[in-house]
Amino acid sequence: MEQDIDKLLKLQEIDLEIDRLEKLIKKIPEEIENLKQKKEELLFKFEKINNDIKHAEARKKEKELDIQTYQDRILKIEDALNRVKTNEEYKSLLREKAQLEESIMEIEDEILNIMEEIEHLKEEKKKLEKDIEQEKQRIENEIKKKEKLLEETKNKLKQLKEEREKIKKEISPQSLSKYELIKKKRGSKVIAIINDDTCSGCYMVIPPKVYSNLVKGEQLLTCPHCGRFLYYRSV
């Protein structure tokens, strides 16, 4: 079994890289989706400002129509003032006219506020339009990079799996079977490389006799605590 150690180390190296790539392949689509979501949020924010401007302009138009309605009523009152027959009716019409004029002044103040709101929104839209275009381009470029990375990672993973199948054939069935069993239990770190009396896999102290045999390199040994292969490498 000891002659298999170099091949097993290579197999472990491949398996660790496969694990890394598989995690990356799982992570990249999530990152791409997050970027797309950010892009959608930018477009939504821009669309919201457009809608806010439209709604403000619609409110302004409604207020202007209200003023026109009140002004028309005032004209009718002024015409009626010339035809009233009683002093009480005359005073009533004057009160109504005064109320309408006061309402017009209030609405004109509201229109001024709406106009300021529209101006502010248009300035914000102008600034956001520039920022959005830059950020949108950055996000699209980032998405393309990640899509390219995803494709490259998938190709590399495929090559590694093919390489893994080849190297498996160069390892004795007994060693390979034990390797796969340890991998199933402990993950891809199957071989604990050590240079002292502590297992680098579980960080437990290796019994002196096992450590002594390990240093001699007489056989492929396993950690009595975690079951990983032990490989001694002198400093």
Image (cartoon, rainbow, N blue to C red):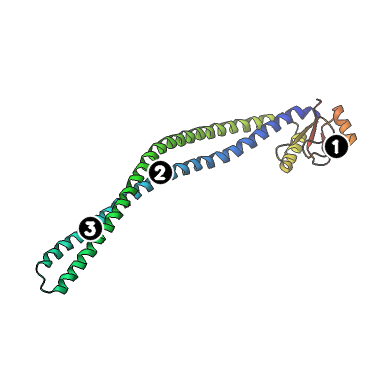
- Choose the circle earlier in sequence order: 3 or 2: 2
Query: In this rendering, would 154 be left or right of 224?
Result: left
Sequence order check, earlier mark of 1 and 2 = 2
Relative to 71, say whether 35 is above or below. above
Label 3 secondary element = helix
Name the amino acid type tagged 1.
Answer: Ile
Label 2: which secondary element: helix
Q: Position of residue 98 (x, y in %)?
A: 22, 64
Q: Which mark is residue 43?
A: 2
Q: Residues within 10 Å of mark 2 (few under 14, many from 20)?
A: some
- Where does label 1 land, which residue? 206
Question: Where 76 sits versus 130, above or below?
Answer: below
Q: Which residue is mark 3?
A: 67
Give the alpha-carbon distance from disc 3 to disc 2, as whole Å. 36 Å
Q: Which residue sits furthest top?
A: 235
Between residues 230 and 120, which one lies in front from this camera angle? 120
Residue at 69%, 31% in the rendered image: 13
Left or right: 185 in relation to 90: right
| Relative side of 197 to 161, left or right | right
